[in-house]
Structures are given as structure tokens and as C-alpha cells.
């Protein structure tokens, strides 16, 4: 048995409390304490920032001091309070301060980038909605669907522009992204996507047969052709988070780590967010917690989000000879056409990052089972690398919504409460762009983003059954993905 299958995930014992997350009450003129809050859909350890992530990205940060600004220890006022210290929250804080001169305070329960922003696969691309083109047109019309495609391209450009203007490195790799047909029947789906990319979205795109894909440096056991979308690239998501955090601080935003919101109240026209060390009182509240949003949130969001687990393995560095043996040397990101997809890319030091969806319990036993299964799948896809050691393994929550698209903007019930979330596992670019759009609209400037993003979230039917819906979906997709 390969050594990689015998190494357990890093785990911490469940505390029996929902530690390290942001808790919101809904009472007017009254604080709703933690004791009355419901726990999340997963074990308490899933949401606890005291539990180590163990990601490869953590190892790439030489000085992690930026991740730990001092906790809030005072009663402070601000124009905007932001809950969540990931890509959406930090981008909102940066754009408010830099572009609009608006004072913002950001509260993060753990360290900056502790959630999905610091543990995703680093795919900076398009596709944050799980709706088909036809479904989007049916929902918001052709013009707004075309605007959605333009917004997605603009999101990728926003990441590039921020790195250039603020002077930080993304460790960018590749050009665009590949969608690969994992079986012959998937080729027709790629042809349909190609038509949408070129005729509707206006993206540069190209269809490649298996031979052409191999010649570009992509050879696996599931190569039945691919679609290359020429928008996007791979990056180091924690370096992006670091760049946003340091820029936001430099422009005057106040960032606080280790500051979970233990209660929330609306007093008159102001939001009051209470933490163990203090309180922020602000006219606007931005919820930017994505898959780590707790159940007891503003009523408009209650029961409307479905966090789902995504799992990542990273190998030891592969030598040039090993890469040549497998016929895989291009670092451009790639994903397959499964609903329960695999996604992978070579990293700057030659490691292979290999990710996939799965799991609905997030127990230590399930984590180890998923790691063992994913390791087998990696070796199956890349037989020349069978037995190569797995040096990093971790998971995190992506965020789905009932409508299968992101939600960005104000709550219809309270225009001073804003949210940016539900990126459906493709949020690196969209989350950063969402922060820019939220800042612009809070400043009173219409953003002109697609109506698809503006639709308010709706609760799932019988929301306490959401994980059961997910399990049934996983079972069906396993049967039909091939």
C-alpha cells in the first residue's frame, strides 16, 4: 500500500459548540445570544478555526503575520462592517477604502483566509453558476445572460488589475482553462459549450481532439478531447488573499482576526456586531462568509445556502522525467465534465494538485476514506505516477444556493444589509469582483452587473433536509457520470 494512504487527515476534536464562526441574530432592539443559535450542517470542527487546515498553500507563506491582525478590543464605529475575512470581505474592504474613501471594519472569526479563500484549488476562471445557458436565458433573458458572461470575464481581469496596481504576486500559471471529456459521450457537451463560448459569451475558445490535447502536455486515462476556454489562469489563492489584506490595510481598512460575531442586532438605522472583545456599530453590514455562513443568519438567508465539501490532494514535486513519462507538463488548470468533477493542475514546484467533490459528514473517518479513494483515482488517471507520495491533503466548504448562481447585493428586506456568496466552487475571480461591486453600490454608484446576481436567495424546501438532498444528488451523479 502506498505511504500516502496511511497518513490520516489533520483533525481536532469536536468541541460540542459552533466555535469560530459568525453568529447572527435577527431581533430588532434585542441581542440574540449564542445559546439560541442553531449549529451548522456539519460537525463543529468543520467551522472551528482552531482546527488546522493543513493545506499546501499554508506552506508557501514565508511570514504569515498578516493573517493575524489583533482582535477587536473596543467599541468602534464605522460606515460599513464586513463579516468574513476571505476574498469577498477583503476585496470589499479594499475597494471601499481605496476607491470610495469609506471607512470599513472587517471581522474574521479565525485568521484571514482561513475558509475557502485559503484552501481552494486556485482556479481563477469563469463559471460561478451551475445553470445551463438555456436555464439562465429562461430566468433573466438573453441580454442579462450575455451580461453575466461579460461580468465573469471582468472578474478575471479584476484579479489581474488588482495584483498589478497593488503590486503583489499571484504566482499565475497557464492561460485559460481546459474542460476535458472524461468519456466519449461528453464530447457533444463540449461542442455545445464551444458554441456558447464563441457565439454568445465572446470568449476565445478552441476544441481539441485527444491527440491535440496530448501534444499540449495533457495525457491521462480520461482524454477524449477538450475545450480550451482562453479566459483565466491558475494562481496561489493564499497569495491573492495576502495581497488583498495588505492592500486593504494600507488603504486604511480596519481588519480584525480572532473576532467571531457572537451576536447581532439592528438598533435604529445601525447594525451592531458584538464580538468577545468589543462591538462594531455601522450603517451597513456585509455578509461575506460564503460556505461558512452559520445557520442562524439574517432571515433572508436562513435555509437558502448549501455548503458542500471539496477535497484536495497535493503530491510531492514531480521531476521533469516523471512529468515526461506521464506526458503531462502544462500548468494550465483542467477539470472534467462530471457533475462530481475532478480538477487538477501542476503547481510551480512541479507538484500535482488533484481535487474533487464528495463527503457529507466531514468526520475523521469519512475524511480518511475520501483521501484513500481520491488517491486511487489519481493513480488511475495518471498511471506513471502510481505510488507517488501525497504530501498534503485538506478539504473545505464550497457554497451552493437553491437557484444555482451567486447572490450579490442588498437584501430586499433591508437595503443596508448586503451579501456576496454562493460561488458554486468557482469563486476565486467572482468573489474578488463581488467585493468591488458591493463597494461600488454601497457608495451609491450603480454597478450594472447582471440581473442573475441580483436575484435574492430563496430557502430550500424543508431546509433541514439539505444534506439528504445532496446525498441523493451524489448517488445519482455517481450512477450517471460514468
Image (spheres, helix red, strand yellow):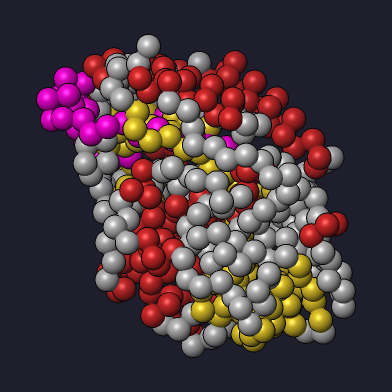
Q: Residue at (33%, 40%) from the top-left corner?
A: 333
Q: Quadrant of residue 376?
A: top left
Give 367 or 480, whichever is nearer the viewer: 367
Vertically, is 95 above or below 373? below
Q: How far across and how far down the image is residue 256, in percent?
A: 54, 72
Give 284 or 47, whichever is nearer the viewer: 47
Q: How many marks?
A: 0
Q: Start and end of the magenta stretch?
A: 307-336
Q: How far across and how far down the image is residue 241, in percent?
A: 41, 61
Q: Residue at (68%, 66%) from the top-left corner?
A: 261
Vertically, is 20 above or below 322? below
Residue 310 left/right relative to 268: left
In the image, is residue 90 part of the stretch drawn in magenta?
no
Give 50 or 140, whichever is nearer the viewer: 50
Assign the N terminus to one quadrant of the image.
top left
Q: Residue furthest left?
A: 321
Q: Residue at (82%, 84%) from the top-left corner?
A: 268
Give 481 or 377, whichever is nearer the viewer: 377
Q: How far across and how far down the image is residue 291, in percent?
A: 61, 49
Vertically, is 2 above or below 111? above
Vertically, is 257 above or below 29? above
In the image, is residue 333 part of the stretch drawn in magenta?
yes
Q: How far across and how far down the image is residue 279, in percent?
A: 69, 78
Asked whether residue 243 appears in the rendered view, the answer is yes
Amino acid at each position: 500500500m502506498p505511504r500516502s494512504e496511511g497518513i490520516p487527515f489533520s483533525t481536532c476534536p469536536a468541541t460540542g459548540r459552533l466555535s469560530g464562526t459568525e453568529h447572527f441574530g435577527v431581533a430588532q432592539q434585542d441581542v440574540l445570544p449564542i445559546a439560541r443559535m442553531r449549529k451548522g450542517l456539519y460537525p463543529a470542527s468543520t467551522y472551528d478555526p482552531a482546527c488546522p487546515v493543513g493545506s499546501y498553500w499554508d506552506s508557501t507563506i514565508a511570514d504569515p503575520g498578516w493573517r493575524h491582525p489583533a482582535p477587536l478590543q473596543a467599541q468602534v464605529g464605522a460606515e460599513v462592517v464586513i463579516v468574513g475575512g476571505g476574498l469577498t470581505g477583503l476585496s470589499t474592504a479594499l475597494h471601499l477604502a481605496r476607491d470610495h474613501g469609506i471607512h470599513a471594519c472587517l471581522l474574521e472569526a479565525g485568521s484571514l483566509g482561513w475558509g475557502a479563500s485559503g484552501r481552494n484549488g486556485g482556479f481563477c476562471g469563469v463559471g460561478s453558476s451551475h445553470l445551463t445557458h438555456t436555464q439562465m436565458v429562461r430566468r433573466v433573458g438573453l441580454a442579462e445572460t450575455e451580461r453575466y458572461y461579460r461580468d465573469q470575464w471582468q472578474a478575471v481581469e479584476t484579479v489581474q488589475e488588482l495584483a498589478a496596481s497593488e503590486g503583489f504576486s499571484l504566482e499565475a500559471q497557464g492561460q485559460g482553462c481546459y474542460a476535458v471529456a472524461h468519456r466519449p459521450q461528453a464530447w457533444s457537451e463540449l461542442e455545445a459549450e464551444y458554441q456558447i463560448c464563441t457565439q454568445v459569451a465572446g470568449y476565445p475558445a478552441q476544441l481539441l481532439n485527444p491527440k491535440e490535447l496530448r501534444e499540449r502536455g495533457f495525457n491521462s486515462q480520461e482524454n477524449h478531447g477538450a475545450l480550451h476556454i482562453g479566459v483565466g489562469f491558475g494562481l496561489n489563492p493564499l497569495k491573492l488573499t495576502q495581497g488583498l489584506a495588505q492592500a486593504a490595510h494600507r488603504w486604511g481598512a480596519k481588519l480584525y482576526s480572532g473576532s467571531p460575531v457572537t451576536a447581532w442586532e439592528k438598533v435604529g438605522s445601525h447594525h451592531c456586531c458584538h464580538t468577545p472583545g468589543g462591538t462594531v456599530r455601522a450603517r451597513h453590514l456585509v455578509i461575506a462568509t460564503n460556505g461558512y455562513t452559520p445557520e442562524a443568519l439574517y432571515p433572508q438567508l436562513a435555509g437558502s445556502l448549501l455548503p458542500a465539501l471539496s477535497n484536495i490532494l497535493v503530491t510531492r514535486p514531480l521531476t521533469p522525467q516523471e512529468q515526461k513519462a506521464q506526458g503531462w507538463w502544462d500548468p494550465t488548470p483542467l477539470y472534467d465534465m462530471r457533475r462530481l468533477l475532478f480538477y487538477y493542475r501542476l503547481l510551480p514546484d512541479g507538484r500535482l494538485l488533484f481535487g474533487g467533490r464528495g463527503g457529507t459528514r466531514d468526520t475523521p473517518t469519512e475524511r480518511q476514506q475520501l483521501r484513500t479513494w481520491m488517491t486511487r483515482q489519481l493513480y488511475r488517471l495518471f498511471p506513471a505516477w502510481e505510488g507517488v507520495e501525497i504530501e498534503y491533503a485538506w478539504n473545505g466548504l464550497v457554497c451552493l444556493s437553491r437557484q444555482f448562481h451567486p447572490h450579490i447585493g442588498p437584501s430586499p428586506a433591508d437595503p443596508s444589509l448586503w451579501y456576496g456568496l454562493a460561488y458554486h466552487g468557482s469563486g476565486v475571480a467572482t468573489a474578488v469582483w463581488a467585493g468591488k461591486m458591493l463597494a461600488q453600490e454601497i457608495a451609491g454608484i450603480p454597478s450594472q452587473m447582471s440581473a442573475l446576481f441580483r436575484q435574492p436567495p430563496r430557502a430550500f424546501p424543508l431546509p433541514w433536509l439539505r444534506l439528504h438532498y445532496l446525498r441523493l444528488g451524489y448517488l445519482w451523479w455517481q450512477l450517471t457520470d460514468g
